[in-house]
Image (cartoon, rainbow, N blue to C red):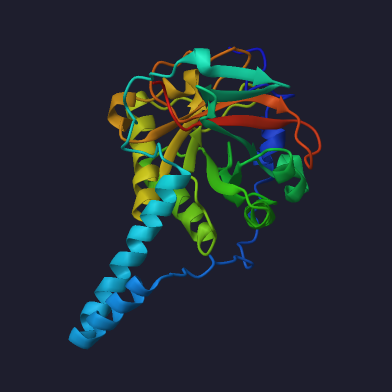
Amino acid sequence: MLKHSRHNSQDSRYSSARHGFEAGDQMPSSTHAHGEAPLRTRGKGFAHAIENVTRTNSFALVVFIILVVGLVGVGIHAALFPKEAGDKAGNSSTYNWDYLKKDNGRFYYSIEGKAESRTGVDVSEHQGYINWDAVAKDGISFAFVRVGNRGLTTGKLSQDEYFEYNAKAADQAGLKVGAYFFSQATTEEEAREEADFVIERLKGRNITYPVAYDHERLADTPGRADDLSPEQMTKNAAAFCARIQEAGYTPMIHGSMKDLLRYNLPDLAHYNIWLAQYNVNAPTFNQYFSIWQYSNTGSVSGIDGNVDMNIQFLAEEK
């Protein structure tokens, strides 16, 4: 167990107090979702193509526009998150940790002088109000915001008190936004219920990073899902991720090495991993992962107190 583990009841946001599991209150659903900016195209070539298609067949025009918008959307997401599920997921990691450097408590990955990483945070209601403009100015490129959780003992689904604000304000500040849900699903049906809960609250929001499934034991509080078999853990994760993917988002599985080894990982090889490992100079997990959560005691302008720090790797080695 790591000294400053996510499970530490004083320092980790995964303590029952930080999650508010025992309150069992359902937070109100979002009513202030904001949509993405309309897609704009430039150049005479595109306009000329549409004109020609229009003359031929109005139905073809509709199909043509749908295809173009879809391809542009895929391109944008690939640029923002190039190591998405299905690319490297399930393979062994080939990172060269000689390229990993630490400066003022933050890790960076640079190959031949070129930056190949981004710095990010993940937050929940535990952080309280966050000044996201200040966060962005402090070199933070992305943020995972907690959508909610399932109660440790009651099993009740609850929305994070600050989810709506964090998702909107982080996006408006220019950060790339992902989401996560703290699961206590004991069955595939409950895992799909959690995914639907998340999807409903992400509608209309500019989510350009993955949606993560976070299922783990807590050190300080027993949970309803602590004793699941690896087979059931794996089925639950697969059910959640499949539902998220069907909705058009990129699913991801989050956890420490101890958490991840509760799964039959070969059966989840097509999903990407967000690794949590603290107090090491480099990760020791040998499977490919694209994001490393390396601290839960980070300091970032605009956030009071400790915050989880993450690095996203954009390349491996040359």
Q: Quadrant of residue 280?
A: top right
Q: Residue at x 64, y 52 (%)?
A: 174
Q: Quadrant of residue 191?
A: top left
Position of residue 136 measured from the top left corner of the image (x, y, whole percent) = 70, 45
Position of residue 92 measured from the top left corner of the image (x, y, whole percent) = 34, 19
Query: Above or below — where is 138 with respect to 299?
Result: below
As drawn, is 79 to the left or to the right of 60? Answer: right
Q: Residue furthest right?
A: 304
Position of residue 24 measured from the top left corner of the image (x, y, whole percent) = 65, 47
As drawn, is 82 to the left or to the right of 174? Answer: left
Numbered marks: total: 0
Quadrant that contains the N terminus: top right
As drawn, is 11 to the left or to the right of 55? Answer: right
Whether residue 283 is visible: no
Position of residue 105 measured from the top left corner of the image (x, y, whole percent) = 71, 21
Quadrant that contains the C terminus: top left
Q: Nearer the viewer, residue 97 or 271?
A: 97
Query: Above or below — where is 30 with respect to 136?
Result: below
Q: Residue at x 51, y 30 (%)?
A: 116
Q: Nearer the viewer, residue 285 or 154?
A: 285
Q: Residue at x 32, y 27 (%)?
A: 90
Q: Residue furthest bottom?
A: 55
Q: Residue furthest left?
A: 56
Q: Residue furthest front?
A: 44
Whether residue 61 is visible: yes
Q: Nearer the viewer, residue 262 or 278?
A: 278
Query: Above or below — where is 156 with respect to 34?
Result: above
Q: Residue at x 33, y 71 (%)?
A: 45
